[in-house]
Amino acid sequence: MNALAATLVLPLAGVFILAMIGHRRSAKTVNLVISTTTFVTALLLAIEVFHQGPILSASKLFYIDGFNVYLILLNAFVGMTTAIFSGPYMEHEVAIGRVDDGRMRLYYSMYQGFLFTMLMALSTNNLGILWVAVEGATLATVLLVSLYRTHESIEAGWKYFIICGVGISQALFGTILVYFAAVKIIPGSEEGLLWTVLQQHAARMDGGVMALAFVFLLVGYGTKVGLVPLHNWLPDAHSEGPTPMSAILSGLLLNIALYAVVRFKMLVDPALGHHLAGNLMMGFGMLSFSVAGLLLHRQYDVKRMFSYSSIEHMGLMTFAFGIGGPLATFGALLHMIVHSLTKSAIFITVGHATHVAGTQKMSEIRGLIRTQPFVGWGLLVGTCAIAGFPPFGVFTSEFLLFTATIKSYPWLAPALVLGLSIAFAGLFRNLQPMVFGEPPAGQKPVVANMWPVFIHLALVLWLGISIPTVLAQWLDQATVMLVGRGVL
Amino acid sequence: MLIASLSLPEQVVLTLAALILLSSFLLLAQVRLDSLINTFALQGLLIFFATVLMAFIAGKYHLLISAALTLFLKVFFIPGQLRLLVIRLDIRREVEVIGNPMLVMLFAAALVLFSYYVALPIRELSLLSTRNTIAISLAVVLIGMLIVISRRKAVAQVVGFMSMENGLFFAAVVSTYGMPMVVELGIAFDVLVAVILFGVFFFHIRTEIGSLDTDRLNHLTEVEK
């Protein structure tokens, strides 16, 4: 329990500390130390959960089980590795005069604030607090998206603020409806939003209200997941902000929103007794997956392209959770990890690549592998991993999903293969010249720390070859909670 | 289920609900920024009265805390903050042309009908006094969204956004006598931070494009310019 408290208090303290000293040279070290300590405490928490099973805090406000423990660990881990990357990256941005002292304080403070809200969203047992934390994550990042104060970044920030704010309001309406259904059957209304309580009574809740609630929740949190047609903010926000932000937005925030949807799905399914929630998710997922794959081909900005790839993968996960069944669900849970790790690795590499080339336009990024081999290779291997090449973990999860699709909805399998190949083509037509082309005269390597990228890709490779027993057990527990039976 | 069969306080709540819906329509049609902000404050005040009344009807006195929060945030702080910004940005008398106001109004009316249609399964479950109020609160949320969509000025969009928040709060009050206190406080905190951030954004947008007309925020596209 203490480990959980520390995991939440550390980043919260970081918000205030870094708001004061964020402009000093030592800030990047402080940021890294806080993030690393958070990761260590998250690890301790994971060990505790591994030995004791699910933990419910005394106040019933926090609940850690197989479903969220690995996401907490993932969050803290990516938070730490991105902090390693963010130090030199932001120093470079200061050096070329894109940000000043005040904004560096804002940046570091909100970096920790963002991690705090995400950890809060994952660990809370109260579905109302979940909403507050997800909205808090928007508020923490909105000024970071517009950090460079250019026309484009302010536009992206405003779009992000308004679209996500309006979207997430729908989710609050859904939450109110769930609470409404709950207080009808659960006496003691203060507990009517606790997930652990709701889960016990889910089967008795009114189906009509829950179905309506789920529609609002899916649209609301779905906006934040980046589901088509609610995705407009995502490529803008991910491409205009500083790259470390893109890495954690793409890698982590989207997962949190999907996590919220899935938590609610666990309550809605028993209440309804039929597959409405799943069908809705399949529809939205398939649409996002296909549209994003096609839009990959039209991109000119490297960060925008990888944002669309994020939409594509989030669509795939939503689709997988929608299919239900142990195999698809296990695949989707695994995909959440491997996508996060790979996508944040890619964004880190892209960050270095844009510094090498001095632009985000793909037509002007050329010959990375010759100018700076590590960056070139990082981008190449990362893109191979995200495109689903064996033996990387993305292949494993996509393969599980594909198998499940053939079993339950064989007529959707061709669409899935087609979508994956379209996305693959979209990524590689742009990647090839960036990595192998002729470097422009005078292109120089930059100071780059590629360790986070290698660690992430190595982990993805490891997950593709053999999933550690601990993780497999957690994923299986989560699968059992979601669909009633596991795969192991 | 005649209205007359309800107790007097319940009838008053229903009347207030109707007035809140009316204020949403006013927000939609109001073209001058300072009047828009005043109308928003009025909506907050109506919700405050409804909440106080609900607290006494149901005997749930923790609702009074929520009511006090609403009074502070929605009637004083947010409108005050917006007024201050509008004065500092010197756009108080600015008039906004709403494209096709007739169509927007008709659409809002359709949204009200839609809300009643959607709320049908809920109404059958609920108590008599809250029958209409859920539909109305949903309508307020949707009309708030319509304000955000149909307006071009950033300030008007923020008012629409906050009016959605009003609808949500009203929904929670009338359907479940408010959310648990910790959630209520969290939401209030988020709203507070959002207002401050909106203020910051106004200045950024103004410095960058010279006005608060969000139609000019159109640089980001899928194709290269």
Image (spheres, rainbow, N blue to C red):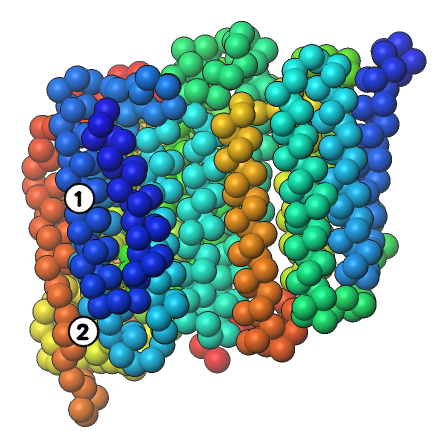
The answer as to whether the residues below labels 2 and 1 share one chain is: yes
Q: How many residues crowd mark 1 within 10 Å: few (<14), some (14–19), many (20+)?
A: some
Measured from the top left, where is residue A154 in percent x and y? 50, 68
Looking at the picture, tell me which residue is in the foreground, B222 or B181: B181
Looking at the picture, tell me which residue is in the foreground, A398 or A115: A115
- Cβ–Cβ under 8 Å for marks 2 and 1: no
Residue type, numbered disc 1: Thr
Tag 2's secondary structure? helix
Looking at the picture, tell me which residue is in the foreground, A399 or B168: B168
The residue sitting at 55% across, 50% down in the picture is B194
The residue sitting at 18% across, 36% down in the picture is A41
| Vertical comparison of A89 with A205: above or below | below
Judge from the rendering whether residue A84 lies leftward or rightward of residue A159; answer left or right.
left
Q: Quadrant of residue A189?
A: top right
Measured from the top left, where is residue A304 in percent x and y? 37, 65
The residue sitting at 29% across, 49% down in the picture is A14
| Vertical comparison of A426 with A185: above or below | below
Measured from the top left, where is residue A79 in percent x and y? 24, 49
Q: Is residue B167 visible?
A: yes
Task: Read off the residue under disc 2.
Answer: A435
Q: How many residues crowd mark 2 within 10 Å: few (<14), some (14–19), many (20+)?
A: many
Judge from the rendering whether residue B133 lies leftward or rightward of residue A63; answer left or right.
right
| Vertical comparison of A355 with A57: above or below | below
- Which circle's residue, 2 or 1, is located before the other in the chain? 1
Residue type, numbered disc 2: Val
Please state which of the two labelled residues, at mark 2 or mark 1, is closer to the viewer.
1
Which subunit holds the residue at mark 1? A
Question: How far apart in space, not on screen, are marks 2 and 1 (Cα)?
Answer: 36 Å
Task: Read off the residue under disc 1.
Answer: A37
The residue sitting at 46% across, 72% down in the picture is A149
Judge from the rendering whether residue A476 lies leftward or rightward of residue A362; answer left or right.
left
Which subunit holds the residue at mark 2? A
